[in-house]
Image (cartoon, rainbow, N blue to C red):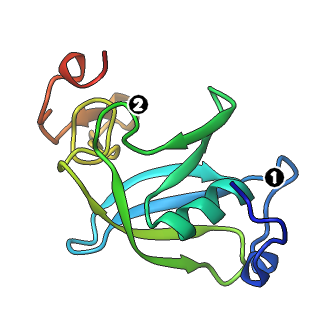
């Protein structure tokens, strides 16, 4: 929950017209980009207050506490704001080694394999499923 008066540092964050800002989640140790999500002022303030990543779910239209169903939480190590103030970078410790709802370590598991004929290029899954999503989400 947002405190009665918003913290002063929040004034430097430029939310879009819907009150959201993109948030990149990165493994603090390896540098691997784990996922991209959205935050609003409330989720950002809760993330800073609790040290656990909280996002805004556009599909559910509510706060999404990363790992609330799966147990694969992200502990905040460091928070950065880009030069324009409109993108956040969360350096995190990913608990359970799985950040993606597909059961993979990262949401960025597909790579474009280019062909001599650009129209034949295709996305290929290059990272393994670490755990069957059916076993993670009930």
**Which residue is rendered at x = 44% and y = 67% of the image?**
51
Q: Is residue 62 visible?
A: yes
* N-term-proximal mark, 1 vs 2: 1
Give the x, y percent position of residue 94: 27, 57
Query: Left or right of 135: which side holds 53?
Result: right
**Where residue 131 is drawn, which disc sits there?**
none
Q: Residue furthest front?
A: 4
Identify residue for label 1.
Answer: 19
Callout in the foreground (1, 2): 1
78 is higher (above) or lower (below) than 128:
below
**CA separation in Å, label 1 and label 2:** 38 Å
Q: Nearer the viewer, residue 96 or 103?
A: 96
Residue 5, image quadrant: bottom right
Query: Left or right of 54: which side holds 113?
Result: left
21 is higher (above) or lower (below) than 103:
below
Q: Residue furthest right?
A: 17
**Which residue is rendered at x = 80% and y = 71% of the image?**
6
Give the x, y percent position of residue 29: 22, 75
Identify residue for label 2.
Answer: 119
* Label 2 packing within 10 angstroms: few (<14), some (14-19), many (20+): few
Locate the C terminus by quadrant: top left
Locate the N terminus by quadrant: bottom right
């Amino acid at each position: 929950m947002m405190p009665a008066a918003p913290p002063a540092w929040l004034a430097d964050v430029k939310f879009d017209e819907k009150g959201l800002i993109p948030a990149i989640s990165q493994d603090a140790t390896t540098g691997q980009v784990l996922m991209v999500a959205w935050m609003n002022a409330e989720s950002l303030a809760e993330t800073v207050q609790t040290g656990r990543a909280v996002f805004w779910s556009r599909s559910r239209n509510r706060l999404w506490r990363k790992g609330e169903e799966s147990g694969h939480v992200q502990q905040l190590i460091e928070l950065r704001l880009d030069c324009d103030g409109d993108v956040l970078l969360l350096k995190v410790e990913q608990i359970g080694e799985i950040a993606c709802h597909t059961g993979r370590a990262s949401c960025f598991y597909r790579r474009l394999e280019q062909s001599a004929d650009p129209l034949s290029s295709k996305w290929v899954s290059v990272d393994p499923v670490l755990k069957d999503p059916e076993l993670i989400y009930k």
